[in-house]
Amino acid sequence: MSEPKSALGGVTAAGFASIREIGPLGMISLRAKPDAAGLAKAIKAAVGTGLPDVRRIVAEGDRACGWMSPDEYLLVMPYAAVAGALEAIAKAMAGAHHLAVDVSDARAVFRVEGAKADQVLAKLSPVDFATLEPGELRRTRAAQVAAAFWREGDGFTVVCFRSVGRYVFDLLASGAKPGSELF
Amino acid sequence: MLTLTCPYCGVAAEETELSPGYEAHLKRFGPGSTDEEFEAYMFARKNPKGVHFERWRHAYGCGKWFLAARCTATLEVFGTYPAQVGEPPANIIEKIKARRPEWKGYK
Amino acid sequence: MSTRLAKGGRLIDRSAALEFSFNGKRMKGFAGDTLAAALLANDQMLVGRSFKYHRPRGIVAAGPEEPNALVNLGSGGRLEPNQRTTLTELFDGLEATSQNHWPSLEFDVGVLNNTAARFLPAGFYYKTFIHPRPFWKHVFEPIIRQSAGLGKAPKDRDADRYEQAYAFCDLLVVGGGIAGLQAALMAGRAGARVLLLEQTAHWGGRAPVDGDVIDGKPAGAWVEEAVAALEGMENVTLRARCMAAGVYDHGYVLADEKVADHTPGDGRPKHRLWRIRAGKILTATGAIERPLSFAGNDIPGVMLAASVRDYVVNWAVSPGDRTVVVTNNDDGYRTAIALREAGLAVPAIVDARSAPSGALIDKARALGLRIEAGRGIAKVKGGKRVTSVAICLQAGEGAVIEEIACDAVAMSGGWSPVVHLWSHCGGKLTWDAAQAHFRPDPARPPLNHDGGAMVYAAGAANGAMTAATALPDAVAQAEAALAAMGMKAKRGKAAAGAVAEAVVEGPMEPVWIMPQGASIDLKSKMWLDYQNDVKVSDVQLAAREGYESVEHTKRYTTLGMATDQGKLSNINGLAVLAGALNAEIPQVGTTTFRPPYVPVTLGALAGEARDEIFQPLRRTPMHEWHEKNGAYFEPVGLWRRPYCFPRAGETHEQAVHREVLNTRNALGLLDASTLGKIIVKGPDAGKFLDMLYTGVMSSLPIGKCRYGLMCNEQGFLSDDGVVARIDEETWLCHTTSGGADRIHGWMEDWLQCEWWDWQVYTANVTEQYAQVAVVGPNARKVLEKLGGMDVSKEALPFMTWADGRLGGFACRVYRISFSGELSYEIAVPASHGAAFWAALHEAGAEFGAMAYGTEALHIMRAEKGFIMTGDETDGTVIPQDLGLDWAISKKKADYLGKRGQARNFLASTERWKLVGFETLDGSVIPDGAYIVAAGVNANGQGNTQGRVTSTYYSPTLKKGIAMGLLHRGPERMGEVVEFNTVKGGTVKARVVDAVFFDKDGEKQNV
């Protein structure tokens, strides 16, 4: 098997915020109702966190679990950890109605970093960053495509579909051009 | 451009984050139904000036369908609620009656 | 002449001289000038021509209401037509040219329209268009088109960039005059998130020009302190050069920030369109002065009185040496006083009121100014510049009492609040008879999502026309807006509202025509709309011809339809209409105020969406390879898929034929990654899929594949694809490339809204996998060479799938075929897609491996008679029309579309049904061709009995082949029908079976 290749091969751009593609990152879409038997155990086993509250993402080291919808969670982990995590979920939730699928390759993931990183995203998404809470995972629109992001470290982690990775990177790079700071 | 609050994830989403799904609370008629029933289900849509119940999907958010009660004339929103109901919840009905005493009900 | 005064000018920096050009002529100005101010300082009063009569037009105003002084700005990639000189900040090297004239501004042939004015009255276009009709097309239209149009569209690519940004606030305050500042202060101190917008580069609005005194200091000083206080508040954001263009539903406001208009080429975005969501909106947008309607009021040199004052006070520019002031209110006197104080001559103040009195009148008298009360202007004389005015009795018919030499006229017809933003979303107006204007009716505001008021108006925008009344009004309105949001304004000494010294003014007197008994000759020289050349006589004619609605009159006369949208002309026009109809002004009402308040450049509306990011292009993991190998792409939804891979010297058609033949004879590789892939899992998944598909999926054995059709509830075919059973509870549904998101949404809709108690989860995993179709007689050989799993006929028969490894790649292999060849569709994780694709090419080289594109795919599926969603279907076709009855379960009680298909016209035997066609001469039937039938329909059009749905030249069969829908088609095998052709005439074709190639499937079942 070849080395897994992220959508854009780790492309970067510098401006008043810096943009870089990260990944490939391991991601599992886990669909289950919050009260499904074994769910907490499955998430704990897969990423080591508890169940996130509505619209929150909780992290544990390089793994995390995000609330995507009332019956969907996004599990984030190293790329190589996915197969093991899927097995752990299957074991913990055997007999309970759920769906766990590897979506690591279906995504492009970016880091937007710098003190004004939120201003890059404010050009693309109808989101009030002043009220975006710590640990909030916001699913929204970035210009013309679906995206999700959350605050992490010195900026944001942005996730979109792989096929539009180039489009989203170009948007972020364009929005971060020097001289176009909003404030 | 409307803002509707998704009842599942609590986001006050603007219209560009939503996709419309037209009239809510339709009853499906399948095989064995009369032409009249099927026509009512398929084609006979309400188009009121005033209180209306609609389906919206939080398409760029949590992906869930929800229902909204709003006034098509003033765009006042009486409430949004999950789609897994057969008729509007009582608290929404009450709110509409308080705001629109002349309203004749959702049917 | 107009000129720069030796001293003064509160906005200019005399130490910073700037050079600019107008029509190629080099001119000088100062930093802080608007282009209009700089033009006047260079004695350039004549700046354009009107739209219809090409009359000379001069600068009238000093703000966004300016109807005349529009220019082309810049050149090449920075050329912008229709720029308002009054809003354009001067910068070094600015280039402006006048527009709407030919051959020159000074001499214009279009002015002939002017002498023909009596042949071009209101409604000319309508009347001419109707009769005589040939005249319009051959005579009038070509001439009008040649000379019409304001400005010219730029031809070059825009050299600048634009962007958009979202902003959120509790209170949006529009307007940075004293009312807006006061309201922002109140809200800021109350802790609200405040966004304050000002359309110009300067704060304070009119008050500093008008000499108001606030809290005991000059207004300018108070403004500076207020701005400093606001800048010190973390919860307040101030944006100058930012014009709120429109108010929309639920507190949505668009505002156009001119970031770098005045610093072109500095790398910043030229404009930024703010998409603001505000809890409440407070409009402190001030008021606009109205012109007076007297004969010759459009001659360059006739200006709004307050604008004359602006030029003198703000930019030290004198519009004329001798300025006659004509007014119906006290404010006009401020201009006379300002001119006199600047050392300029004011030969007379012509006041339409018979007995004006008040502090300003007293001050004018004290300065020795001559006041002509009860008088009006009979006529302004001059051509390209005012030379004199003739004075008459306002109450009379225009008999001249005296002629006064002058080179400028400052007119004031009263003030109209800027109610645009209040009105955009349905705010209603009330007529204020005392001030003769419409102002916001606080009882009928535009409504928000909660049914409460969305917009509050304050200050002059709310009819509080003086500083002394505007400030308390701003406090009251801000308090009301805050209270409605559950916030409380802070009072007390430190937070008290500011107080302005009251200036006692006498009442104004409405004057709609000057003199009131003016003859038709005079009235046909009284301009209402300067840009569109609409006169008092035109509106009166419209009324006589029966146009009683103000909306109809607007369209008939074009009043207020120019780029200024009637900012100066609307109230005057509807007052004239009311007079002509003998009705009250409020009964006539106003036309509808629509966004934008001032035109917004298209670049700002497009924002970042241009070039590469105009729209999202979806790329597969193999996209880079395709680009490197010369792919010619076609759009499939937002995907870009290779149509073919032309080689040097090949046409696209030749490339496609090569790809087909190579696939049929050796080995073809297709990037099928775009194919939709949706996982459906759960205890009720089988039941769910049986509802979704017309066939039965619940009975599909694990490891097997089955072709399925999906219909909408009307019964029409909506998508098709192969379904694979993965395990007891899991199915994988393939959709068409364009259909993945739509079908996934369709599934979720039914699961969430109809069968929410069914235990089913779906996941759209389309992009998780790169998928390659390995097709052709050598397909198995290349996979065997890669090695790792058994792909033999026995281990992996047709319509089965298996997981395994090929050449080290973890993959899932489907034995399905869309070409009739031996075919494997192989899915690998997208991160390995490019490597797997390369590995197939490398291993396949010895077997003749060659990539093929979508057109070869289409031809091969057509040779096999396979339908294509979107070709054979168009939303009106049911599966039964396509001979797909075999894929419809007869046993199932229900599936989506079953009831719809039972409707009598769909169940009828008279439908157009799918068959194949072969032309008798071997040619290719044109795309979209119809099958002609005898006779004509009720509209005299030829009857049809079918149409072609797919038509190609088959390189395999070396002739044209086609599929299409024909009336009772399958019953008519062997019959010859005629298709119409693009060039006229018809082409004959025989009705045949739609499967042209390998009818028994011998090639794929090996």
Image (tube, coloured by chain):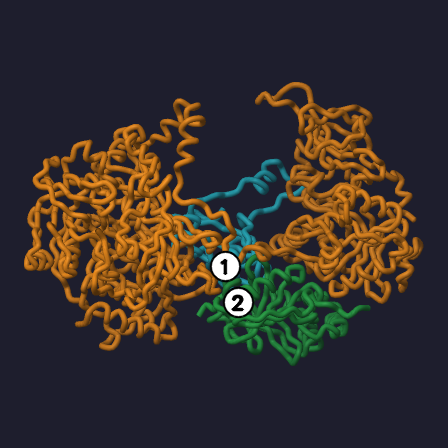
Chain colours: A green, B cyan, C orange
Q: Are marks 1 and 2 on the same chain?
A: no
Residue A149, relative to residue B36: is it above or below?
below
Residue A177: numbered disc? 2
Most extreme residue toward the top, as rendered? C935
- Picture coordinates of residue B24 (x, y %)? 54, 50
- Picture coordinates of residue C562 (x, y %)? 35, 43
**Residue C361's quadrant in the figure?**
bottom left
What residue sits 40% from the left and 45% below the top?
Answer: C151
Tell me the chain of label 1: C
Q: Residues within 10 Å of mark 1 (few under 14, many from 20)?
A: many
Q: Please give the count of numbered marks on the rendered protein.
A: 2
Q: Tell whether A60 sits left or right of C103.
A: right
Q: Nearer the viewer, residue C75 or C160?
A: C75
What residue sits 68% from the left and 48% below the top?
Answer: C634
Q: Tell whether C38 sits left or right of C985.
A: left
**Element type at marker 2?**
loop
Most extreme residue toward the bottom, as rendered? A61
Amino acid type, residue under disc 1 in the picture: Arg
**Residue C987's quadrant in the figure?**
top right
Q: Is residue C941 visible?
A: yes
Tell me the chain of label 2: A
Question: Is there a contact, CB below 8 Å, between mark 1 and mark 2?
Answer: yes
Q: CA distance from mark 1 to mark 2?
A: 11 Å
- Picture coordinates of residue C796 (x, y %)? 89, 55
Residue C588, relative to residue C335: is it above or below?
above
**Element type at marker 1?**
loop
Amino acid type, residue under disc 2 in the picture: Lys
According to the picture, the residue beneath numbered tag 1 turns out to be C161
Q: Is residue C479 visible?
A: no
- Picture coordinates of residue B21 (x, y %)? 56, 50
